[in-house]
Image: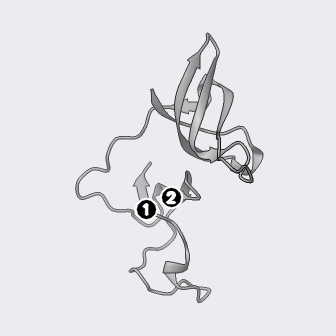
Amino acid sequence: MELEVAPLAAELAGSWFAARALKLTAKRLTVEYRALLRDENETVPTPLSEKVDLFRARPPPPDKPRGWAPKEGGAAQMLHADGWWVVVVKVLRRRGEPLLDGTPAHAWETGSVRRK
């Protein structure tokens, strides 16, 4: 079963990653992440598996509704480093338009945005 999981690692708090369920017990779920690796330095990468509480799992989101676009001040989720992170849209810019600090918008590897 495909799902999204909030990993246990503190540095990933607030994010959700694609995973598949391996085993279900009354209170916990064993999952294997699609993009997270057990050890990034392994010669043959092995997906990270861990046991998580059920509240850390959710079904994959539905497709983005036709015509949906982010709005300033609205909640969304941003794909970053293979995980979905909850964000608040501060300002909308056109692709390539510089950010306030002068960093070009394309310098941010945000992937895509989906509704929350």
In the rendered image, the vertical position of residue 40 relative to residue 100, given as above or below: above
Q: Classify mark 2: residues with Cα within 10 Å, few (<14), some (14-19) or many (20+).
A: many
**Residue 112 image offset from top left, x and y in percent:** 43, 62
In the rendered image, the vertical position of residue 102 relative to residue 9, given as above or below: below
In-front residue for pair 64/30: 30
In-front residue for pair 48/66: 48
Q: Quadrant of residue 59?
A: top left
The image quadrant where one finds the N terminus is top left
**Residue 12 image offset from top left, x and y in percent:** 69, 49
- Label 2 to label 1, Cα distance in Å? 6 Å
Residue 29 horizontal side relative to residue 93, left or right: right
Q: Quadrant of residue 114?
A: bottom left
Which amino acid lies under the numbered mark 2 shown in the image of this protein?
A: Met
Residue 29 horizontal side relative to residue 2, left or right: right
Residue 92 horizontal side relative to residue 46, left or right: left
The residue carrying mark 2 is 78
Residue 112: give its label: 1
Residue found 54% across the figure and 69% down from its top: 109
Residue found 48% across the figure and 33% down from its top: 3
**Residue 76 image offset from top left, x and y in percent:** 47, 55
Residue found 52% across the figure and 69% down from its top: 90
Residue 39 horizontal side relative to residue 83, left or right: right
Figure coloring: one colour
Residue found 61% across the figure and 12% down from its top: 25
Which amino acid lies under the numbered mark 1 shown in the image of this protein?
A: Ser
Q: Are marks 2 and 1 in contact (CB under 8 Å)?
A: yes
What number of labels is visible? 2
